Image (cartoon, rainbow, N blue to C red):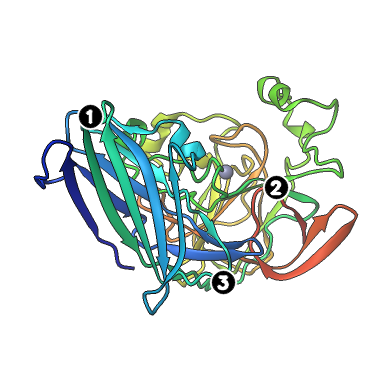
Amino acid sequence: MFTFFIGLIIGTSALIADTSPISVEVRPGKVYIATSDSGQHLNFDFLLRNTSDQKVMINKVELSVFDAADKLAWRDFYDEYGRPSLELTRNPSLAPKGTALFYNPFHTLPKDIPLERLKFEFSFSTEDRLKTYSAVIEVKPVSFVQNTDLILPLKGRVLVWDGYDYNSHHRRVDYTQNFFEQIGQKTNFQRYAIDFVIVDEAGQHYRGRTRTNNDWYRNRPDEMTEYLSYGVPVFAAGAGKVVAVRDDSEDRKFDPKALASDERAFYGNYVVIDHLNGEFSLYGHIKKGSALVKAGNTVKQGVQIASVGAAGSSLFPHLHFELRDGSGARTVEGLPSYFSNYKRILGSSTKSVKRGSINTGEIVTR
Ligand SMILES: [Zn+2]
């Protein structure tokens, strides 16, 4: 991966170049291309820094994609006028001396576009528009090659409640903000995480009366056993060596102070498997006392390792699954994941998939 940035300042009254107060970096440093039926996906962020003492607006981001012969293959932009995106209509701004992550809005491109070199051009201005700034940054993404064979970690009718699409909560973690700075969080370990829940044929993940989403959130059932996922077996998605286990935390209790002694405390309880090839899988929020493995155990693909719970920072029972590049949390980045031999449930029919990626909204089964 190769990145660089050029910043320049263009004053409105004079053509005197100066050092731009705005810098742009790509995070994480290694940008992967993950593929699905809907195209090529790029899951990375821009780290923006404003060293001036004025608030700065982000007015435009433009992308040009070049092939290996440096010929243009795609061009697109978002701005506040012609193509206002969700990002830009929120009038994103950088506080004086502020830092923020800006989520790459060009997250999916058609399958046939050669993604050799991506040039991003940013335009910024002060609120009064008297000063404008620009920055250019380039990205050379690489295709993600997964070393581990993975199968679905749950059996039954499984809904991806939230995955790693552009609007997913896993993806939108701004670790430059105070809370994360204070706990030493430098990366987004859940960039590609998947929350699995067991559902019935109607897509409900609990028994009993039907609830609206708002009702579900405000007045969720207190009995964990009302949830179809609660206590169901969690299976090792891939073979490897167990490197971390915790199963002594209560359901739906998360105290940020716990992060001081356990950087994975977000998950409450968890199992981490090292696949011994640079890839690790993490199974989060498992039920108290349900771990069937210990650190140091070797596990085969498909063996039960725990049961689904709602420990840690979790609203209801679900399995939070991640493929990632380390076992901890503070400096670990998420990795894309492809699964083998599952079925997509498409209404009254199913479609067998030899190997594919799974994301928000999909209903799948082993
Ligand atoms: Zn999750």
Question: Distance between the Cα atoms at labels 3 and 1?
Answer: 41 Å
Residue to which mark 1 is pinned = 96
Amino acid under disc 3: Asp
Residue at mark 1: C-beta within 8 A of ligand 1: no
- Left or right: where 110 falls relative to 173: right
Residue 103 position within the rendered picture, expressed as x and y whole percent measured from the top left: 43, 45
Query: Ligand 1 appears in which quadrant?
Result: top right
Which one is nearer the viewer's eye here, 104 or 345?
A: 104
Residue 345 visible? The answer is yes
Residue to which mark 2 is pinned = 361
Q: Which secondary structure lies at badge 1?
A: loop
Check the image and name the residue furthest to the right.
Answer: 348
Amino acid under disc 1: Pro
The vertical placement of 129 against 239, above or below, is above
Q: Residue 175 appears in which quarter of the rendering?
A: top left
Residue 66 position within the rendered picture, expressed as x and y whole percent measured from the top left: 40, 70
Crowding near the residue tagged with mark 1, few <14, some 14–19, many ≥20 C-alpha atoms within 10 Å: some
Q: Earlier in the sequence, mark 3 or mark 1?
A: 1
- Left or right: where 142 falls relative to 363: left
Q: Earlier in the sequence, mark 1 or mark 2?
A: 1
Question: Distance between the Cα atoms at labels 3 and 2?
Answer: 25 Å
Q: Which secondary structure lies at badge 2?
A: loop
